[in-house]
Structures are given as structure tokens and as C-alpha cells.
Image: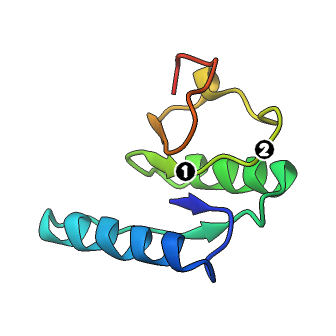
Amino acid sequence: MILPNLADPFYAELAHHIQDVARSRGLLVWIGASDADPAVEAALVNRMNQQGIDGIIMVPSPGENQFTPAELRVPIIVIGPPTEDRSC
């Protein structure tokens, strides 16, 4: 899971509930903060993708992606406004 700000109460609660659901299904959630920086977000996405994860849940940074979702080996779920990239 990639969030823009872990100190924000909304994102902290969102992460908490997603972790609860994941644990109930025997899954582990890794959480990274992008600080709403597209370059940090891309680095997190790429690193997570290399680790054999099942998927990525993210609140994207404003602006254009600095990664290509279609090239990743995992599905991406975007929380927030609709994205033009239909591969998410």
C-alpha cells in the first residue's frame, strides 16, 4: 500500500482497515509513504514490484505517473479520482 501521508488521520484509518481485512485472509500489507512525490511513488512501486507482491493499493500523487502500470507484474488498485490509465 502506498499512501501520500501516514500522519493524516484519514490515511492512517484507511491503512488500519485494509490491514485488518488482509490479516483476516492471511495476507501481509507493506505500507510506504510517497509524501505526494511522484518520484518517490515510482521508486516504491518499482521496489514493491520486485519483491513478489500480489498487488498494490495506492493513493496516487498528483501529476503524471513516473511508472507504467501496464509494465508491472501485479494489479494496481487506485484509491481516489479516476485515472486515464485503464490498466489500474
17 lies left or right of 80: left
29 lies left or right of 72: left
Please tell me whether mark 1 or mark 2 is closer to you in this view. 2
Amino acid, disc 1: Met
Up the image or down, 72 lies above or below 70; here it is: below
- Tell me which residue sits at (43%, 51%) in the image: 53
- Residue 66 vs residue 63, the one in the foreground: 63
Q: Which residue is mark 2?
A: 62
Amino acid, disc 2: Pro
Crowd rating for badge 2 (residues with CA inside 10 Å; few <14, some 14–19, many 20+): few
Asked whether the residues under the numbered discs 1 and 2 touch, taking CB atoms below 8 Å apart as contact, a structural biologist would say no
12 lies left or right of 61: left
**Tag 1, which secondary structure?**
strand
Counting from the top left corner in percent of width and height, residue 71 is at 63, 24
- Residue 23 vs residue 4, the one in the foreground: 4
Counting from the top left corner in percent of width and height, residue 41 is at 74, 53
Crowd rating for badge 1 (residues with CA inside 10 Å; few <14, some 14–19, many 20+): many
Q: Which residue is mark 1?
A: 58
- Tell me which residue sits at (42%, 70%) in the image: 15
- Tell me which residue sits at (17%, 67%) in the image: 26
Q: CA distance from mark 1 to mark 2?
A: 12 Å
53 lies left or right of 26: right
**Tag 2, which secondary structure?**
loop
